[in-house]
Amino acid sequence: MKKILMLAIVATAVISTTASAERIKFPDKGWHKGFWITAMGGMTQVGHDTNVQTNRSFDGTFIPAVGLSLGYDIADWIGPMMQFQYGFASDTVGDGTVNYPTESAREHEIKIRLAARGTLPYFMHAGWQPNKWKIIPYLKLGGTAHALYVNAPTNGNKIGAWGGGIAVGGGLETLIIDRIWVGIDITEDLMFMQSYYKTIAGVNTKLVNGGFTPMFSLVGMVGYHF
């Protein structure tokens, strides 16, 4: 009787374990299709924030950046994506003259990207991929709208810039638990910026030169695939 009872307990444990394993099968079918969202944080390169009247650039080449990415994978391997990225920094501006006094200012920078993101279907089902997590590299191509504004107390130190261009890049996402994933995203924004003019002491004055400028961004991501 004891042996029968022991066998029953063992059988029950095995069945329960198997059922549990079936319930938590990972990743579940179709996990890489549909809507996804990620939070981003890292750094971005900023150009055309030099006041040509003072010949003084704002802060450094790279500034902190945060943002949000949204996308919808039509298939396992491709889909549209949109990124909203905000960069920010503080610095001293001006050259000590009447129209451009030396003072503290803050820079606000925005990039909005719309792109197609794709990977190779191979990475979804490759035999070397572990059961419990997946590594998926991707490439992206699209367009970027960009604007920045340096907010300072004096009119001559307040500058802005805007433009548009092409976004190329890629990244790596790693599924770590259920539909939660982490990754990195790299973008090179090939921007064409407008010149910026303002009336200073009654004269229409150029404050920022326009032209072509590549801008690099590197961010880490934490996201969820619905």
Image: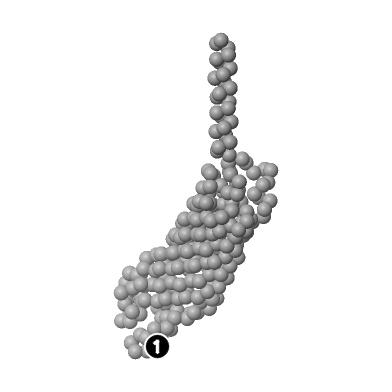
What is the total number of numbered labels drawn onto the structure image? 1
Which picture quadrant has residue 65? bottom left
The N terminus lies in which quarter of the figure? top right
Question: Residue 216 in the image: x percent, y percent?
Answer: 53, 64
Q: Secondary structure at mark 1?
A: strand
Amino acid type shown at disc 1: Asn
Residue lying at the far bottom in this picture: please name it. Answer: 202
Report if residue 182 is visible in the image.
Answer: no
Report if residue 123 is visible in the image.
Answer: yes
What residue sits 47% from the left and 75% below the top?
A: 162
Q: Relative to residue 132, is residue 168 depicted above or below?
A: below
Q: In this view of the protein, which residue sits in the foreground, 6 or 188?
A: 6
Which picture quadrant has residue 49? bottom left
What residue sits 67% from the left and 47% below the top?
A: 125
Question: Residue 121 in the image: x percent, y percent?
Answer: 67, 53
Question: Residue 195 in the image: x percent, y percent?
Answer: 47, 81
Q: Relative to residue 204, is residue 150 depicted above or below?
A: above
Question: Residue 68 in the image: x percent, y percent?
Answer: 47, 59
Q: In this view of the protein, which residue sits in the foreground, 180 or 45?
A: 180
Give the side of residue 223 with respect to residue 122, left or right. Answer: left
Give the side of residue 103 with respect to residue 72, left or right. Answer: left
What residue sits 55% from the left and 73% below the top?
A: 165
**Which residue in the protein does label 1 denote?**
204
What residue sits 69% from the left and 43% below the top?
A: 127
